[in-house]
Amino acid sequence: MTPEIELRVQAFRRALELAAGERASEPVPFAWHKELGAFPLGCCELASQALVKYLKDHDKTLFPYVIAMQWNEDADIHGHVIVALDGEYIDLTLDQFEEYKDWVVAEPIESCGQISSLLRKVRHLKGSITTRKVTLDVIPHEGHILYGWLKATADNLLAASEQDGKHSRMPQLISTDILPQYRAGAEVDSSDAATQVTEKKKRKTMTHVGIITECYQPREVRLRATATQWVSECGLRFRKTTGAAVGSGVWSANRLDLKSIREIQSED
Protein backbone atom coordinates (compact mmCIF):
# COMPACT_ATOMS: atom_id res chain seq x y z
CA MET A 1 0.00 0.00 0.00
CA THR A 2 1.38 3.39 -0.97
CA PRO A 3 1.75 6.14 1.67
CA GLU A 4 -0.90 8.21 -0.16
CA ILE A 5 -3.48 5.42 -0.01
CA GLU A 6 -2.58 4.76 3.62
CA LEU A 7 -3.29 8.40 4.47
CA ARG A 8 -6.60 8.31 2.61
CA VAL A 9 -7.68 5.24 4.55
CA GLN A 10 -6.76 6.93 7.83
CA ALA A 11 -8.54 10.14 6.86
CA PHE A 12 -11.71 8.25 5.93
CA ARG A 13 -11.73 6.37 9.22
CA ARG A 14 -11.37 9.70 11.04
CA ALA A 15 -14.26 11.14 9.02
CA LEU A 16 -16.44 8.24 10.21
CA GLU A 17 -15.36 8.90 13.80
CA LEU A 18 -16.26 12.57 13.46
CA ALA A 19 -19.65 11.70 11.98
CA ALA A 20 -20.37 9.53 15.02
CA GLY A 21 -18.77 11.84 17.58
CA GLU A 22 -17.65 15.45 17.58
CA ARG A 23 -19.65 16.44 14.48
CA ALA A 24 -22.63 14.13 14.94
CA SER A 25 -24.95 17.10 15.50
CA GLU A 26 -24.36 18.51 12.02
CA PRO A 27 -27.36 18.07 9.66
CA VAL A 28 -25.89 15.34 7.44
CA PRO A 29 -24.35 12.98 10.00
CA PHE A 30 -27.27 13.60 12.37
CA ALA A 31 -29.65 12.19 9.74
CA TRP A 32 -27.72 8.90 9.92
CA HIS A 33 -27.22 8.85 13.68
CA LYS A 34 -29.07 5.53 13.95
CA GLU A 35 -26.57 3.91 11.57
CA LEU A 36 -23.41 5.66 12.83
CA GLY A 37 -24.13 6.49 16.46
CA ALA A 38 -22.43 3.38 17.81
CA PHE A 39 -19.50 3.43 15.37
CA PRO A 40 -17.62 1.20 14.79
CA LEU A 41 -20.23 -1.25 16.11
CA GLY A 42 -22.55 -2.45 13.35
CA CYS A 43 -20.97 -0.23 10.71
CA CYS A 44 -18.69 -2.65 8.87
CA GLU A 45 -20.52 -2.77 5.54
CA LEU A 46 -21.36 0.93 5.45
CA ALA A 47 -17.74 1.82 6.22
CA SER A 48 -16.24 -0.71 3.80
CA GLN A 49 -18.52 0.13 0.88
CA ALA A 50 -18.00 3.86 1.35
CA LEU A 51 -14.22 3.44 1.66
CA VAL A 52 -14.03 1.46 -1.58
CA LYS A 53 -15.93 4.18 -3.44
CA TYR A 54 -13.71 6.84 -1.86
CA LEU A 55 -10.51 5.11 -2.97
CA LYS A 56 -11.84 4.51 -6.50
CA ASP A 57 -13.09 8.10 -6.80
CA HIS A 58 -9.54 9.32 -6.20
CA ASP A 59 -7.81 6.72 -8.36
CA LYS A 60 -9.73 4.94 -11.11
CA THR A 61 -6.89 2.43 -11.55
CA LEU A 62 -7.42 0.89 -8.11
CA PHE A 63 -9.44 -2.32 -7.78
CA PRO A 64 -10.43 -2.71 -4.13
CA TYR A 65 -12.77 -5.55 -3.16
CA VAL A 66 -15.54 -5.68 -0.58
CA ILE A 67 -15.27 -9.02 1.22
CA ALA A 68 -18.09 -10.37 3.39
CA MET A 69 -17.84 -13.28 5.80
CA GLN A 70 -20.51 -15.11 7.79
CA TRP A 71 -20.18 -17.91 10.31
CA ASN A 72 -22.05 -19.68 13.08
CA GLU A 73 -20.60 -19.84 16.58
CA ASP A 74 -22.21 -20.64 19.92
CA ALA A 75 -25.61 -20.96 18.22
CA ASP A 76 -25.35 -17.38 16.91
CA ILE A 77 -24.88 -16.10 13.35
CA HIS A 78 -21.98 -13.69 12.97
CA GLY A 79 -20.94 -11.52 10.05
CA HIS A 80 -18.29 -9.00 9.13
CA VAL A 81 -17.26 -6.97 6.07
CA ILE A 82 -13.76 -5.78 5.15
CA VAL A 83 -11.81 -4.43 2.16
CA ALA A 84 -8.97 -6.00 0.17
CA LEU A 85 -6.64 -3.92 -1.98
CA ASP A 86 -3.43 -4.91 -3.78
CA GLY A 87 -2.65 -7.88 -1.59
CA GLU A 88 -3.62 -6.28 1.71
CA TYR A 89 -6.69 -6.25 3.94
CA ILE A 90 -8.21 -3.05 5.34
CA ASP A 91 -10.64 -3.26 8.25
CA LEU A 92 -12.10 0.06 9.40
CA THR A 93 -14.26 -1.50 12.11
CA LEU A 94 -12.35 -4.47 13.55
CA ASP A 95 -12.22 -2.68 16.91
CA GLN A 96 -15.98 -3.17 17.30
CA PHE A 97 -15.16 -6.66 18.60
CA GLU A 98 -14.02 -6.96 22.21
CA GLU A 99 -11.08 -9.21 21.35
CA TYR A 100 -9.54 -6.62 19.00
CA LYS A 101 -8.20 -3.33 20.33
CA ASP A 102 -7.72 -1.43 17.07
CA TRP A 103 -8.79 -1.23 13.45
CA VAL A 104 -6.44 -2.28 10.63
CA VAL A 105 -4.95 0.10 8.07
CA ALA A 106 -3.10 -2.60 6.13
CA GLU A 107 -2.47 -6.28 6.77
CA PRO A 108 -0.85 -8.49 4.12
CA ILE A 109 -3.14 -11.22 2.83
CA GLU A 110 -2.32 -14.71 4.16
CA SER A 111 -0.12 -13.29 6.90
CA CYS A 112 -0.25 -14.17 10.59
CA GLY A 113 -2.25 -11.02 11.32
CA GLN A 114 -5.61 -10.60 13.01
CA ILE A 115 -7.77 -10.53 9.87
CA SER A 116 -6.06 -13.56 8.36
CA SER A 117 -6.61 -15.38 11.64
CA LEU A 118 -10.29 -14.39 11.60
CA LEU A 119 -10.68 -15.68 8.04
CA ARG A 120 -9.05 -18.98 8.99
CA LYS A 121 -11.49 -19.23 11.87
CA VAL A 122 -14.43 -18.61 9.52
CA ARG A 123 -13.22 -21.37 7.19
CA HIS A 124 -12.69 -23.73 10.14
CA LEU A 125 -16.28 -23.13 11.26
CA LYS A 126 -17.54 -23.85 7.72
CA GLY A 127 -18.59 -20.25 7.23
CA SER A 128 -18.77 -18.36 3.94
CA ILE A 129 -16.37 -15.78 2.48
CA THR A 130 -17.54 -13.92 -0.62
CA THR A 131 -17.06 -10.65 -2.46
CA ARG A 132 -19.90 -8.16 -2.69
CA LYS A 133 -20.96 -5.65 -5.29
CA VAL A 134 -19.65 -2.15 -4.59
CA THR A 135 -22.71 0.00 -3.88
CA LEU A 136 -23.88 2.80 -1.62
CA ASP A 137 -27.32 1.19 -1.50
CA VAL A 138 -26.32 -0.39 1.82
CA ILE A 139 -26.69 3.09 3.34
CA PRO A 140 -30.38 3.75 4.05
CA HIS A 141 -32.18 6.84 2.79
CA GLU A 142 -30.06 8.82 0.32
CA GLY A 143 -26.70 7.21 1.00
CA HIS A 144 -24.85 9.34 -1.53
CA ILE A 145 -25.47 12.39 0.66
CA LEU A 146 -23.75 10.82 3.66
CA TYR A 147 -20.95 9.56 1.42
CA GLY A 148 -20.46 13.07 0.02
CA TRP A 149 -20.09 14.44 3.57
CA LEU A 150 -17.60 11.71 4.52
CA LYS A 151 -15.60 12.28 1.33
CA ALA A 152 -15.45 16.04 1.80
CA THR A 153 -14.46 15.66 5.46
CA ALA A 154 -11.68 13.18 4.65
CA ASP A 155 -10.42 15.40 1.83
CA ASN A 156 -10.36 18.39 4.18
CA LEU A 157 -8.32 16.42 6.71
CA LEU A 158 -5.80 15.55 4.02
CA ALA A 159 -5.65 19.16 2.81
CA ALA A 160 -5.04 20.35 6.37
CA SER A 161 -2.15 17.91 6.77
CA GLU A 162 -0.57 19.16 3.54
CA GLN A 163 -0.89 22.78 4.63
CA ASP A 164 0.97 21.89 7.80
CA GLY A 165 3.73 20.43 5.66
CA LYS A 166 3.25 16.95 7.10
CA HIS A 167 3.06 14.87 3.94
CA SER A 168 3.97 11.64 5.70
CA ARG A 169 1.39 11.73 8.47
CA MET A 170 -2.06 12.94 9.29
CA PRO A 171 -2.84 15.70 11.82
CA GLN A 172 -2.70 14.76 15.48
CA LEU A 173 -6.35 13.68 15.32
CA ILE A 174 -5.24 10.55 13.51
CA SER A 175 -2.68 8.02 14.65
CA THR A 176 -0.40 6.74 11.89
CA ASP A 177 1.15 4.03 14.06
CA ILE A 178 0.69 0.66 12.37
CA LEU A 179 1.49 -2.48 14.29
CA PRO A 180 4.63 -4.19 12.94
CA GLN A 181 2.82 -7.44 12.20
CA TYR A 182 0.67 -5.62 9.63
CA ARG A 183 3.60 -4.36 7.54
CA ALA A 184 4.97 -6.48 4.73
CA GLY A 185 8.53 -7.59 5.38
CA ALA A 186 8.55 -6.21 8.94
CA GLU A 187 10.66 -7.96 11.55
CA VAL A 188 8.96 -8.82 14.82
CA ASP A 189 10.91 -8.97 18.07
CA SER A 190 10.50 -12.40 19.63
CA SER A 191 10.41 -10.79 23.07
CA ASP A 192 7.01 -9.35 22.18
CA ALA A 193 5.51 -12.77 21.54
CA ALA A 194 2.63 -12.13 23.93
CA THR A 195 1.17 -9.46 21.68
CA GLN A 196 2.82 -9.97 18.31
CA VAL A 197 3.36 -12.94 16.03
CA THR A 198 6.83 -14.44 16.34
CA GLU A 199 7.23 -15.42 12.71
CA LYS A 200 5.76 -13.62 9.71
CA LYS A 201 4.97 -15.38 6.50
CA LYS A 202 6.32 -13.84 3.35
CA ARG A 203 3.69 -12.69 0.91
CA LYS A 204 3.39 -15.38 -1.73
CA THR A 205 3.94 -14.39 -5.35
CA MET A 206 0.98 -14.34 -7.70
CA THR A 207 1.98 -16.37 -10.77
CA HIS A 208 -1.16 -16.39 -12.95
CA VAL A 209 -4.10 -14.23 -13.95
CA GLY A 210 -7.67 -15.36 -14.48
CA ILE A 211 -11.24 -14.09 -14.58
CA ILE A 212 -13.44 -14.43 -11.53
CA THR A 213 -17.14 -13.65 -11.47
CA GLU A 214 -18.25 -11.73 -8.39
CA CYS A 215 -21.90 -10.83 -8.03
CA TYR A 216 -22.29 -11.87 -11.69
CA GLN A 217 -19.68 -9.33 -12.85
CA PRO A 218 -16.40 -10.64 -14.39
CA ARG A 219 -13.06 -9.25 -13.29
CA GLU A 220 -9.48 -10.25 -14.03
CA VAL A 221 -7.37 -10.92 -10.93
CA ARG A 222 -3.93 -12.29 -10.12
CA LEU A 223 -3.74 -15.82 -8.76
CA ARG A 224 -1.39 -18.36 -7.26
CA ALA A 225 -1.83 -22.12 -7.09
CA THR A 226 -1.87 -24.55 -4.19
CA ALA A 227 -2.23 -28.33 -4.53
CA THR A 228 -6.03 -28.17 -4.80
CA GLN A 229 -7.01 -24.49 -5.05
CA TRP A 230 -6.44 -21.22 -6.84
CA VAL A 231 -5.95 -18.30 -4.41
CA SER A 232 -6.75 -14.79 -5.64
CA GLU A 233 -4.99 -11.57 -4.68
CA CYS A 234 -8.00 -10.64 -2.52
CA GLY A 235 -7.69 -13.87 -0.54
CA LEU A 236 -10.61 -15.75 -2.09
CA ARG A 237 -10.05 -19.44 -2.85
CA PHE A 238 -11.43 -21.45 -5.75
CA ARG A 239 -11.40 -25.21 -6.34
CA LYS A 240 -9.07 -26.33 -9.12
CA THR A 241 -11.52 -29.01 -10.21
CA THR A 242 -14.63 -26.87 -10.69
CA GLY A 243 -13.70 -23.20 -10.22
CA ALA A 244 -16.31 -22.85 -7.47
CA ALA A 245 -15.46 -20.62 -4.53
CA VAL A 246 -14.33 -22.61 -1.51
CA GLY A 247 -16.92 -22.48 1.26
CA SER A 248 -19.77 -21.60 -1.09
CA GLY A 249 -22.56 -23.61 -2.63
CA VAL A 250 -22.73 -25.05 -6.11
CA TRP A 251 -24.67 -22.04 -7.36
CA SER A 252 -22.38 -19.42 -5.83
CA ALA A 253 -22.15 -16.10 -7.69
CA ASN A 254 -18.40 -16.15 -7.09
CA ARG A 255 -16.53 -18.44 -9.49
CA LEU A 256 -13.23 -18.69 -11.31
CA ASP A 257 -13.26 -19.33 -15.05
CA LEU A 258 -10.69 -22.12 -15.28
CA LYS A 259 -10.32 -21.67 -19.04
CA SER A 260 -9.26 -18.04 -18.57
CA ILE A 261 -6.23 -18.83 -16.40
CA ARG A 262 -2.87 -17.99 -17.93
CA GLU A 263 0.63 -17.63 -16.56
CA ILE A 264 2.06 -14.17 -15.93
CA GLN A 265 4.90 -13.65 -18.36
CA SER A 266 8.19 -12.26 -17.11
CA GLU A 267 9.18 -8.86 -18.45
CA ASP A 268 12.76 -10.09 -18.95
Image (cartoon, grey):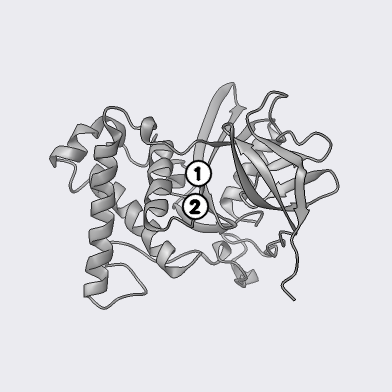
Residue 116 picture location, percent across and down: 62, 49
Say which element carries label 2: strand
The label shown at residue 157 is none
Q: Is residue 129 left or right of residue 157?
A: right
Residue 201 picture location, percent across and down: 70, 62
Residue 18 picture location, percent across and down: 24, 49
Q: Residue at x 42, y 41 (%)?
A: 49
In depth, the one of 127 and 251 nearer the eye is: 251
Q: Residue at x 63, y 48 (%)?
A: 220
Q: Would you place residue 147 above or below residue 77 in this image?
A: below
* Residue with the mark numbered 1: 82
Residue 43 picture location, percent across and down: 38, 37
Mark 2–mark 1 CB contact (< 8 Å)? yes
Q: Amino acid at mark 1?
A: Ile
User: In the rendered image, which quarter is residue 25 located in?
Assistant: top left
Give the alpha-carbon distance from disc 2 to disc 1, as whole Å.
6 Å
Q: Residues within 10 Å of mark 1 (few under 14, many from 20)?
A: many
Q: Amino acid at mark 2?
A: Ile
Q: Residue at x 31, y 28 (%)?
A: 140
Quarter of the C terminus within the rendering:
bottom right
Q: Is residue 216 left or right of residue 224?
A: left
The label shown at residue 90 is 2
Q: Residues within 10 Å of mark 2 (few under 14, many from 20)?
A: many
In depth, the one of 167 and 78 nearer the eye is: 167
